[in-house]
């Protein structure tokens, strides 16, 4: 009899531990998915300044000029406290950073953006790594906020194999990747792999798309049909349990992405800046487990499954 009671006690203790782990896992996902306030936004805009951005789009404006105008309008509206950077695919007079990642300063970004010209190729993969590493470095210091990459481009990457390598690693580290295709004849290859994708076929839609990512809707927003937030659903949880989940589950990996073992991007645009562009068909580099893009996917998937199950059960309960 005593042994039976001991067995039941151990079983009950195991169930309690599993239940608490499930709650922690779900709460951790919900915390990571909550939209941050505007001044918590940290974003790097990867701006395509390749030769084809000199072409005209609907509305009679060059793509590069439309992008410059849209950026100036949107950055003027960024709340104080936000940290924004603009990274070029091809180095400008000041190097790759048109606007260094940090607090917005109109006296700095306006003349830099106005002086921008377009010429060169499309080393998108290498530039994504540079942007992600800078965001990860910032997150390692601050450890709060929403961290995004916004890609504004009118063509496919010249180093597509690097995009294929780095994109999963970037997403596995919890960085959001939003993409805007500028006057493209077909959707960008990142359309189905990014957090959000928008088409911009004229200057007005380009400004609207950039504004939506930087100022408006977040690709991480999470609320149910009735507008009740996930935090409100979990208010009954003890404070210490919520605190434990924040510590255990919201400490993402901030180490830089691993370097590719493939050759560096070859810029062939000097001879013909309007040369048709497309991905270089090379296999992605071999990746070990140390890159952060492999092993970290399994717990993320498991937590996501638990989260979805909880939300479905809550929805069913509300309908009864």
Image: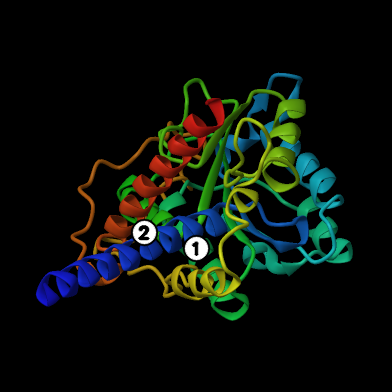
Q: Position of residue 6 (x, y in %)?
A: 17, 75
Q: Can you tell which quarter of the image residue 169 is in?
A: bottom left
Give the mark nearest the N terminus, 2 or 1: 1
Q: Tell me the crowding category of disc 1: few under 14, some 14 to 19, or many 20 or more residues within 10 angstroms, Cα based.
A: many
Q: Position of residue 76 (x, y in %)?
A: 86, 51
User: Which residue is found at the position 50% from the left and 20% from the top?
Assistant: 185
Question: Which type of secondary structure does the marked residue at label 2 adopt?
Answer: helix
Q: Position of residue 80 (x, y in %)?
A: 85, 63
Viewer-side residue, 34 vs 48: 34
Q: Tell me the crowding category of disc 2: few under 14, some 14 to 19, or many 20 or more residues within 10 angstroms, Cα based.
A: many
Q: Can you tell which quarter of the image residue 146 is in?
A: bottom right
Question: Which type of secondary structure does the marked residue at label 1 adopt?
Answer: helix
Q: Residue furthest bottom?
A: 141
User: Which residue is found at the position 37% from the left and 54% from the top?
Assistant: 303
From what the image shows, is residue 313 above or below residue 110? above
Viewer-side residue, 123 vs 32: 32
User: Which residue is found at the position 59% from the left and 31% from the top?
Assistant: 198
Q: Which mark is residue 132?
A: 1
Q: Position of residue 155 (x, y in %)?
A: 49, 35
From what the image shows, is residue 91 above or below residue 62? below
From what the image shows, is residue 164 above or below residue 130? above
Do callouts 2 and 1 mark residues in contact (Cβ within 8 Å)?
yes
Q: Is residue 86 left or right of residue 313?
A: right
Can you identify the residue that label 2 sits on? 169
Q: Which mark is residue 40?
A: none
The colour scheme applied to this rendered structure is rainbow
User: Which residue is found at the position 62% from the left and 30% from the top?
Assistant: 225
């Amino acid at each position: 009899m005593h042994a039976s009671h001991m067995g039941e006690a151990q079983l009950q203790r195991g169930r309690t531990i599993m239940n608490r782990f499930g709650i922690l896992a779900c709460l951790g996902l919900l915390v990571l998915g909550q939209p941050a306030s505007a001044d918590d936004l940290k974003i790097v805009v990867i701006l395509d300044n390749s030769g084809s951005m000199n072409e005209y789009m609907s509305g009679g404006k060059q793509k590069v000029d439309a992008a410059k105008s849209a950026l100036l309008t949107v950055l003027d509206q960024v709340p104080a406290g936000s940290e924004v950077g603009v990274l070029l695919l091809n180095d400008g007079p000041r190097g790759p950073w048109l606007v260094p990642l940090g607090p917005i300063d109109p006296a700095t970004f306006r003349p830099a953006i106005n002086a921008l010209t377009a010429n060169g190729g499309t080393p998108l993969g290498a530039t994504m790594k540079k942007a992600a590493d800078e965001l990860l470095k910032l997150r390692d210091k601050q450890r709060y906020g929403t961290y995004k990459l916004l890609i504004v481009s009118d063509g496919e990457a010249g180093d597509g194999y690097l995009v294929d390598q780095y994109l999963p690693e970037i997403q596995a580290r919890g960085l959001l990747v939003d993409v805007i295709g500028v006057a493209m004849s077909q959707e960008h290859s990142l359309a189905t792999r990014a957090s959000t994708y928008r088409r911009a076929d004229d200057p007005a839609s380009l400004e609207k798309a950039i504004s939506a990512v930087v100022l408006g809707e977040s690709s991480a927003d999470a609320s149910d049909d009735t507008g009740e937030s996930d935090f409100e659903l979990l208010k009954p949880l003890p404070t210490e349990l919520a605190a434990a989940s924040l510590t255990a589950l919201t400490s993402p990996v901030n180490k830089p992405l691993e370097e590719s073992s493939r050759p560096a991007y070859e810029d062939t645009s000097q001879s013909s800046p309007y040369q048709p562009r497309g991905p270089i068909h090379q296999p992605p580099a071999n990746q070990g487990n140390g890159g952060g893009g492999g092993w970290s996917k399994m717990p993320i998937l498991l937590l996501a499954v638990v989260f979805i199950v909880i939300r479905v059960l809550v929805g069913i309960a509300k309908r009864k």
